[in-house]
Image (cartoon, helix red, strand yellow):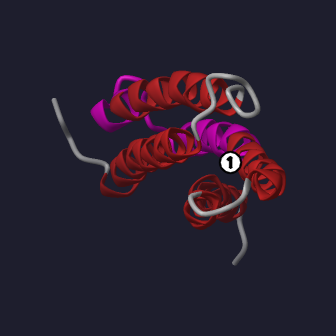
Amino acid sequence: MFSIYTLLLYIHILSAVLSIGPLFVVLTVVKKMRTASNGEMSPYIEAFKGAIAIVKHSGHVLVASGILLMWHAGYHWRTSWIVMTFLVMLASIVFLARAFKRTLRTFNTPAYDQQQFVSLLQRKTWMYILLLLIMLWLMVAKPILW
């Protein structure tokens, strides 16, 4: 039988996939940036920005569906894995807001160095993936931490 909980869970899982999946595409784009000419960089940067936009907006759905799932399942806000998930989520929001904009803004400026630019994007993408994977683990394993 189909229930509201099942629908919310499906939406939550789909938004988690859309919050993490594009980042692995981004890693491929970043790899291509390493050897791209300056004229080829703009489409790669636009693809990068588009993938980050998908990640960001999927995160909105992820948070909303997660809160609805908590409410529907009767979890308390003070449950350890929920508290930790929200703390990591806040860190990831701050990270996402700051990590890529500053680097992307250097393109076509005197401060732009292609290899440094690509290395920063790659490192920051992996850092963001790590934060999302920590949240994923917390949501799936639901560890009792205190």
Q: Is 51 situated left or right of 88 in this image?
A: right
Q: Is 3 situated left or right of 141 in this image?
A: right
The chief SS type of the magenta part is helix
Residue sitting nearer the eye, 87 or 54? 54
Q: Is 118 situated left or right of 42 in this image?
A: left
Amino acid type, residue under disc 1 in the picture: Val
Residue sitting nearer the eye, 55 or 74? 55
Estimate the x, y position of residue 78 in percent, counting from the top left. Answer: 36, 23
In the image, residue 66 lies in the stretch drawn in magenta: yes
Q: Residue at x 55, y 61 (%)?
A: 27
With respect to residue 83, does 55 lie above or below? below
With respect to residue 10, does 124 lie above or below? above
Q: Report which quarter residue 108 is drawn in.
A: top right
Q: Helix, strand, or loop for circle 1?
A: helix
Residue sitting nearer the eye, 145 or 123? 123
On-image quarter of the N terminus: bottom right
Where are the magenta residues, as a range? Answer: 57-83
With respect to residue 17, does 97 lie above or below? above
Residue sitting nearer the eye, 118 or 36? 36
Q: Which residue is mark 1?
A: 55
Estimate the x, y position of residue 100 in percent, counting from the top left. Answer: 61, 33
On-image quarter of the C terminus: top left
Residue that extends furthest to the bottom in the rendered view of this protein: 1
Q: Residue at x 58, y 22 (%)?
A: 98
Q: Residue at x 75, y 50 (%)?
A: 38
Residue that extends furthest to the left in the rendered view of this protein: 146
With respect to residue 76, does 134 lie above or below? below
Estimate the x, y position of residue 58 in percent, counting from the top left. Answer: 72, 48
Q: Is 113 situated left or right of 126 in this image?
A: right
Count all numbered tags in the image, as a single digit. 1
In the image, residue 107 lies in the stretch drawn in magenta: no
Q: Report which quarter residue 14 is drawn in.
A: bottom right
